[in-house]
Amino acid sequence: MKKNEIYEGTVIALKFPNKGMVEVRGETELVLVKNTIPGQRVRFQLKKAGKRRVGNLIEVVTPSACENQTPPCPHFHDCGGCAYQTMNYENQKSLKLEQVQTLLRNVDSGFPLEECVASPRVWEYRNKMEFSFGDEIKDGPLTLGLHKRGSFYDIVPVTDCRIVDSDIRKIVAATMEFFREKNIPFYHKMRHEGALRHLLVRKAWKTGELLVCLVTTSFASIPEKEFCDCLLSLSLTGSYAGILHMINDGLADVVRAETTTVLYGHEYFYEELLGLTFKISPFSFFQTNSAGAEVLYQTVREYLGDIEGKVVFDLYCGTGTIAQMLAPVAKKVVGVEIVEEAVRAARENASLNQLDNCFFYAGDVGKVIEELEETPDTIVLDPPREGIHPKAIHRILDFNVNRIIYVSCKPTSLARDMEIFLEAGYRPLKAKCVDMFPWTRGIETVCLLDRLD
């Protein structure tokens, strides 16, 4: 096979999460092609030859048998946000489960994973979305939306996005039209000029409170009052907790704030989960699917069993959501998280919920747990996508607890870490997937590990 040539083949399996292994007739090596689904017949351009072949998808010649619906979202084919809208929800759940099962059963052939739990809300479930300003085509009119599939520069307007609710859609549409009329330029990432960068919108599921953050550079004047009045004039089902203007003159294309001006309300909002209240700031980590988070955390509770009178470590605790779910039953919960802002939020929320047996520490998990005086009876792990650092795993194993709960948002990281736990004498007792991200490739997996005597 030659680089840059066009080929056609059949996707025989997925290499999680989004690269299909394409078989081309007469070739012994498979080609990895992004954004494909098993069973599809595809045309692709070979971009990397040799031992590890990689291709870019050109078109789907024949759909997979599991693709049985027209994508409900009009932006699906251009936007890079969703992957599975050509199949119904049940087929999508089955595909995700099969992918995770394959990974984990390569580690342990008897891995007890048999279920993918549905999200309580399949549409309009996201409580947070980061939108980018730009143009849909070079030198085209200003737009506001998500990156085009496979593109770093082009922005697709997503005013009819189906995974956020109508309030967020209205805010995005109004913001785009407002700045089009004002003729304020977007920030050009290559030329480092222009003003408009991002729009961050968060909405609480239970309280309906909205937090809107406009992120710009300081290179142009922004009509703050007019923009605020524009948003306040919208007819929404929820209510604004705050409207903020953030300045970011950094070169990196990330949503962050060097300074913040409150145009309306305040810099936070409140959400409720399983009877607890959480104060959330613009950049607080919080599960993007609130209804799904309740299912996820209820699964963790169920797997832990009776923890009355026990000390629980919640490692990689983020803003301490899981810790606070367990605190009313446990004797003591200790959370560890490397992000200091998240730890401050965890402490504040524990106080808000009148939980005096939650203690949170900021720092690297592997180092902090060496310094703690407490010894846990059980451990909950909810690491970031890259999983647990090997040094931290071995320090966790030194506690010799009988039970460990591992909550994973990236199955490949889970499979890698699972090999270490199995070698250390643990076995998977229960496991299930929880679909927190319908129509995308994302999936959460909860595993209960039991130490062999």
Image (tube, rainbow, N blue to C red):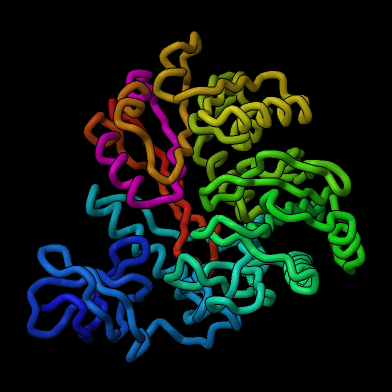
Q: Is residue 312 above or below residue 142?
A: above
Farthest residue toward the bottom? 61
Q: From which residue to which does the magenta span run?
A: 396-420
Classify residue 329 by image quadrant. top right
Describe residue 226's horizontal placement relative to residue 219 as left or right: right
Question: Residue 300's spot in the image, x, y percent?
Answer: 53, 41
Q: Position of residue 200 (x, y in %)?
A: 68, 55
Instruction: From the viewer's side, name the closer residue of 70 and 143.
Output: 143
Q: How many marks?
A: 0
Q: Residue at x 88, y 48 (%)?
A: 264
Magenta includes 352? no
| Residue under the image location 47 percent in, 80 percent down | 87
Q: Is residue 166 left or right of residue 406?
A: right
Is residue 203 visible in this depiction of the protein? no
Q: Is residue 190 above or below residue 287?
A: below
Q: Position of residue 319 (x, y in %)?
A: 62, 35
Q: Is residue 175 above or below residue 398?
A: below
381 relative position to 158: left or right: left
Which of the two residues, 296 or 156, is positioned nearer the viewer here? 156
> Residue 12 location, x and y as percent?
24, 76
For residue 75, what is the image quadrant? bottom right
**For residue 121, side relative to residue 176 (left or right):** left
Task: Name the residue: 71% across, 56% down.
Answer: 201
Question: Looking at the image, which residue sits at the far top?
Answer: 373
Q: Is residue 411 magenta?
A: yes
